[in-house]
Amino acid sequence: MAEEDDTRIRILQSLRGKICEGKNLGPCSGPNRQRDLCTFCTISLDQEEVFRTKVFDKSLSPFYGEDFYFEIPRPFQCLSFYVFAKGVFQRDLPVGKVSIRKEELCKFSGKEHWFGLQPVDPNSEVQGKVHLEMRLNELIIENGSMCQQLLVRIIECQGLPLISGQNCDPYATVSLVGPARFDQKKTKVKKKTSDPQFEETFYFEVTRPNSYTKKSHFQVEEEDIEKLEIKVDLWNNGNLAQDVFLGETRVSVKILRNDHIHRAWYLLQPKGNGKSKTDDLGSLRLNVTYTEDNVLPSACYTPLRTLLLKSPDIKPISASAAHILGDICRERYEAVLPVVRLLLHHSRLVSFVSAIAALELENTQEANTIFRGNSLATRCIDDMMKIVGRSYLTVTLKPVLDEICESNKTCEIDPIKLKEGDNVEVNKENLQGYVQKVFSSITQSSSSCPPLMCDVFRSLRQLASKRFPDDPHVQYSAVSSFVFLRFFAVAVLSPHTFQLRPHHPDLEVSRTLTLISKTIQTLGSWGSLSKNKLSSFKESYMYDFFKSFQEDKCIGKVKKFLDEISSNISKESSGVEDSVVLKEGEVQKRAQGRKRIGKNFKKRWLRVTSRELSYHKHRGKEALCIMPVKNIQAVEKLDESAFNRKNMFQVLHSEKPLYVQAGNCVEASEWVEVLSQVSRCNPDRLGTFHPSAYLAGAWLCCRSLSDSQPGCKPCTPTLLANLQLDIDCDRETERIFSLFTSSYSKLQKMEDACASIAVYQGPLREQDDYSLFTIQDSKETFHTVRQISHILKELQREHDTRSGTAQYGSQENPIVGKTS
């Protein structure tokens, strides 16, 4: 990595949440009111769509239930959620939108809110920024009088939106506006670019010879300055169609009172601030969490990372830094994940989980309540299974879940919910067939269970047997309570959450999955596979249905499966993992090195596994081309100017480069990241690359004439990470720092509790204040808390030293201008 990169801060943005449901969508009255509205939702960063739900049929109050998560690879101003009515023979029509400015996202973080829909007005759909320079000059006109000349230079724009999926043809109008003035001038049209370089200067004369008095410095009268402003509008040239408004900004000329030269970046704004009166369009329930991690250079995190990685070795475990974080952030579910990921990356998770599980078992009095609560141990194991077991779920459940979701067989067995014409016996047979398939897939999957999960299960089994030696079943219930109840049953219930299905299932399929999940939970729970196993069903229809599974062979299959995934035989990693699909999706691919008549870009289905990259004509079709990942030499983004297309990247290998255009900036970033990681250890990786294309006998970037000329730009360094687990340790440590900092008052309270216990050696008056903390050894805990406090202060000092805010009006921190 270059030396200057050692001191820079990485600003990493991510968005997580859920599009829950809509209510009373569409106009409340009038000719546009529709009863059977088929709708879907999209998410846009500014004007770039990055996520889309499936279409929800014929409902004005649809339940979408779509979870989303993605990294945000570029700056943005506004996050928008759009509701569209699906068109059958015409284009999709916007119903309304929810727009949240970036700086306001923190107000809604982590909680569900109802948002009223606003109209989708073309004059409010803006993004990007403009770079302006304004200057006042004084001139002597023909009659010898003095006049003022206002110079306005429009330099460039950045981040203008795509129009119909392609770069726009932008131009700008520059107007001097006042009570009695409206002078407008226009730039040239720039073709096919979202970042136009205008470099055009316009002059506006403001003549007041009668008010001029000879002074060493020319000044505009204050009363005139207050009334004049420069208005810049950006438009897309529609040629034969109507021009499209892209945004505007207004700058008062009074800004030049103290400085005759003003140069700054301005964010483009909607007309009229994007607000207009409208009929009630309904509302949308959303859960949105925006996270911005300001990641320091790796060396800054060494003390905190070292302290956390020592956690499994600390005695007692409650005095460790990782356990203390879980204690003071007990109500924050997201607090556990960065610790799990950090310990997982450094192969320290199993020993930590074993220690905190042992601590929980010490306080468990009944064998039948083992690991029932939402404790630090159960949350750590839950997160571990979701991270490590992702491909295990795909291999085990995806084929049968695809069949269930696509076959549309009715499985309702509740007499109250049966529809007219339903045959309950047929439905029961359908459901039984699905349950058998899911149950068999699970119980025959032990060879695919990740070694790390087996290590944890083996530890849990041993700890449970030691805690309750007289209960022969507890060794199995300790494992089944996780692998069946918290892993497989949850994945069956919500397959879209685990990337097993692209969208939330519809209501009928969701009901089928609920019934299957209930049955699997009971079949898999060793503690319930006893004489009283049917008592767990409150519904009589489930009691009757489950009778068909009361066979010893079902119990035997569960026992055999649990034995295999928690045996004393440690599963060793072969070093060569099975081929796992890492990413796939539709892209635009350019024809490689061939002159073609017609379109050079065609839609293709791109697919990358841990072993190969391939593209296909359509999803599920035979591969048109297969490239082993070991042959990939570099993966880099491609300059927009190469083909006048945004979101392009290139895959370099021994033959012609593979040029690909992703659907949006998020997709492009994900493709580059996955392909870079899967090929990062290849022996023939390149050190340099060409950021543009070789066209018309020359490289567009460096103008070299040889197509074999080595690259003119250094390749992007690839951070070492576990590809399957996708862990950035510095980022996880930064998140842990943020969690400790936000809960610092509780950390101080824990320190006070330790000091009080050490001094008084007995029950305290303040014991109720400290009851939420687990303090087994006050001196050891006090020592760790003091270490944490010292490290937090040092890290905060590093942040304060390095995190300088960009000057207002700079490219990084543009001015939010006035609107009309």
Image (cartoon, grey):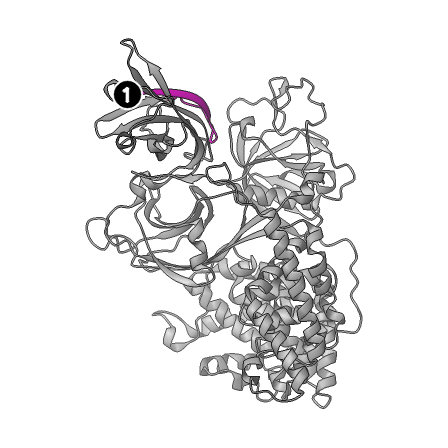
User: In the rendered image of this protein, does residue 730 appear above or below residue 706?
Assistant: below
Q: Is residue 663 left or right of residue 88?
A: right
The residue segment tinted magenta is 187-208
Q: Is 573 covered by the magenta stretch?
A: no
Q: Position of residue 80 (x, y in %)?
A: 41, 48
Residue drawn at x 44%, y 46% is 44
Residue drawn at x 46%, y 63% is 509
The C terminus sits in image quarter: top left
Q: Position of residue 217 (x, y in %)?
A: 38, 23
Task: List the residue tagged with mark 1.
Answer: 212
Residue drawn at x 76%, y 41% is 682
User: In the rendered image of this protein, does residue 688 appear above or below residue 113?
Assistant: above
Q: Is residue 676 left or right of residue 681?
A: left
Q: Quadrant of residue 127?
A: top left
The amino acid pointed to by label 1 is Tyr
Q: Is 191 covered by the magenta stretch?
A: yes
User: In the rendered image of this protein, does residue 287 appear above or below residue 119?
Assistant: below
Q: Position of residue 236 (x, y in %)?
A: 38, 29
The N terminus sits in image quarter: top right
Between 543 and 691, the residue placed more toward the observer is 691
The outermost residue toward the bottom is: 470
